[in-house]
Image (cartoon, rainbow, N blue to C red):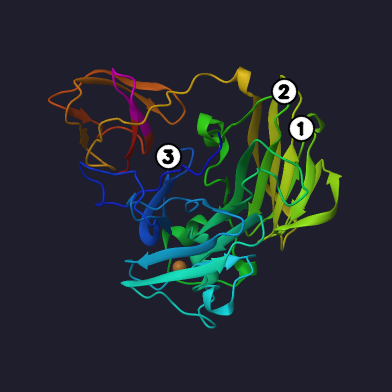
């Protein structure tokens, strides 16, 4: 299932023990020392949000899900060297809680805040930092918010769905991320990396980014754009795509959709109910707005679940350290393992040398370590 699981890494926070359990109440933090990896292994610096309990930031930030009618308290702490905020994009919040620094407040280095609002409207929303916005956005400080109804209908009197599939479109300009020193006007940002849920190209073919459907069970595509580009989506007819919501509200008349434009900051909710046995892609074209030029197309894989290959599906694995690493990674416990690269190719299989695996000549990127008991974990190599 496509989800926000692209790991970006905060160096030094990860050692022998990582708890993926979330503390109560969960708290977001902002970090400025993360990385994301391009399909070719290139490491790109990012800033972003993550759960305090996880200890690392992700691109995009964590998916925030609330229930209609909930009184939300979004706790935020900022240990990073610059001020940040959380702007609740599209939600009807009061001025004090909307995260625009000039009309509410900054969260300075070492500061904490709680954003409060009533989740009165079900729908698809976004959040992002509103400090020096063009720079902090292209660095990765954004995520998606869903307000769900407990009965799994899109809105009161609306259609039911079996699951959400969030698709957050974004882009970044490599030059800016590699040297994040100044902000540019919106129209001067020239993105050259184009992402769906923080990944691109072959990375979208990893199992976690594929939308597996059960015939007869509609899926709610939660579409939101944090890109500087104009998105032009192409839905094959076999998906039976119908647009029900725009910008967090029902559209007056739902309409069948085969192509859809999404401007920066816009959100749509599109229901798909693909034909049994279908296996194909949603085309996601990224157009440069000032030049009106097609930059790149990404493809989101949608497939009948019966065609999917079994997932390893187990996560209680030993944690390796250091992670990320540039020389060796060490596990306490397992005597042997198999390692696969991000494309699923086997790159190692055999015994560990006193718990150690030498990776100094491995390419940059994420790797999956699978242990004899079937558990698996991920680690990153970065030089
Ligand atoms: Cu920021």
Task: Give percent across and percent down for residue 296.
Answer: 65, 45
Element on which disc 3 rests: loop
Cβ atoms under marks 2 and 1 closer than 8 Å: yes
Q: What residue lies at 56% left-to-right and 54% top-to-bottom?
A: 144
Q: Which mark is residue 278?
A: 2
Q: Quadrant of the N terminus?
A: top right
Q: Does the magenta stretch include residue 298?
A: no
Q: Is mark 2 on a helix, strand or loop?
A: loop
Residue at image coords 71%, 19%: 277
Rounded to the nearest whole Å, what is the CA distance between mark 2 and mark 3? 31 Å
Question: Label 1 crowding class (10 Å Cα cut-off): few <14, some 14-19, many 20+?
Answer: many
Q: Is 194 located above or below residue 28 in the figure?
A: above
Rendering coords of residue 51 (x, y %): 39, 54
Q: Which of 38 and 54 is in front in this view?
A: 54
* Quarter placement of the C terminus: top left
Return the residue nearer the eye: 221 or 329.
221
In the displayed structure image, the side of residue 236 where residue 61 appears, left or right: left
Q: Do the residues labelled 1 and 3 touch (CB within 8 Å)?
A: no
Mark 1 residue element: helix
> What residue span does the magenta drawing correspond to?
367-376
Mark 1 and mark 3: Cα distance apart in space: 33 Å
Q: Which of 57 and 179 is in front in this view?
A: 57
Cβ of mark 2 under 8 Å from ligand 1: the answer is no
Q: Badge 2: how crowded within 10 Å, few (<14), some, or many (20+)?
A: some
Q: Measured from the top left, where is residue 242 in percent x and y?
A: 80, 42
Give the mark nearest the N terminus, 1 or 3: 3
């Amino acid at each position: 299932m496509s989800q926000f699981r692209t790991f970006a890494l905060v160096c030094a926070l990860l050692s022998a023990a990582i708890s993926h359990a979330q503390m109560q109440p969960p708290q977001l933090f902002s970090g400025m020392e993360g990385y994301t990896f391009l399909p070719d292994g290139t490491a790109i610096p990012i800033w972003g949000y993550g759960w305090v309990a996880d200890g690392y930031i992700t691109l995009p930030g964590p998916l925030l899900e609330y229930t209609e009618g909930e009184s939300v308290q979004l706790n935020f702490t900022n240990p990073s060297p610059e001020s940040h905020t959380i702007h609740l994009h599209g939600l009807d919040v009061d001025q004090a809680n909307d995260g625009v620094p000039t009309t509410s407040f900054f969260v300075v280095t070492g500061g904490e805040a709680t954003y409060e609002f009533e989740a009165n409207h079900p729908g698809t929303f976004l959040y992002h930092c509103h400090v020096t916005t063009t720079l902090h956005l292209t660095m990765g400080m954004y995520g998606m918010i869903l307000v769900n109804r407990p009965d799994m209908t899109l809105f009161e009197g609306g259609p039911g769905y079996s699951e959400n599939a969030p698709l957050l479109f974004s882009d970044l300009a490599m030059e800016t991320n590699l040297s994040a020193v100044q902000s540019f006007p919106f129209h001067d940002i020239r993105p050259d990396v184009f992402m769906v849920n923080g990944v691109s190209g072959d990375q979208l073919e990893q199992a976690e980014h594929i939308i597996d459907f059960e015939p007869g069970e509609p899926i709610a595509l939660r579409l939101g754009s944090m890109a500087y580009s104009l998105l032009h989506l192409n839905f094959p007819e076999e998906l039976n795509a119908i647009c029900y919501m725009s910008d967090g509200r029902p559209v007056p008349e739902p309409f069948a959709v085969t192509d859809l434009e999404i401007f920066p900051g816009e959100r749509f909710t599109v229901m798909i109910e693909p034909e049994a046995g279908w296996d194909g892609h949603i085309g996601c074209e990224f157009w440069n707005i000032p030049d009106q030029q097609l930059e790149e197309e990404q493809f989101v894989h949608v497939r009948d679940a019966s065609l999917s290959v079994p997932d390893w599906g187990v996560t209680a694995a030993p944690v390796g350290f250091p992670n990320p690493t540039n020389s060796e990674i060490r596990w306490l416990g397992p005597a042997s393992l198999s390692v696969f690269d991000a494309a699923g190719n086997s790159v190692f299989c055999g015994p560990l040398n006193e718990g150690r695996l030498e990776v100094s000549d491995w390419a940059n990127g994420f790797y999956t370590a699978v242990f004899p008991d079937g558990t698996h974990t991920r680690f990153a190599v970065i030089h």
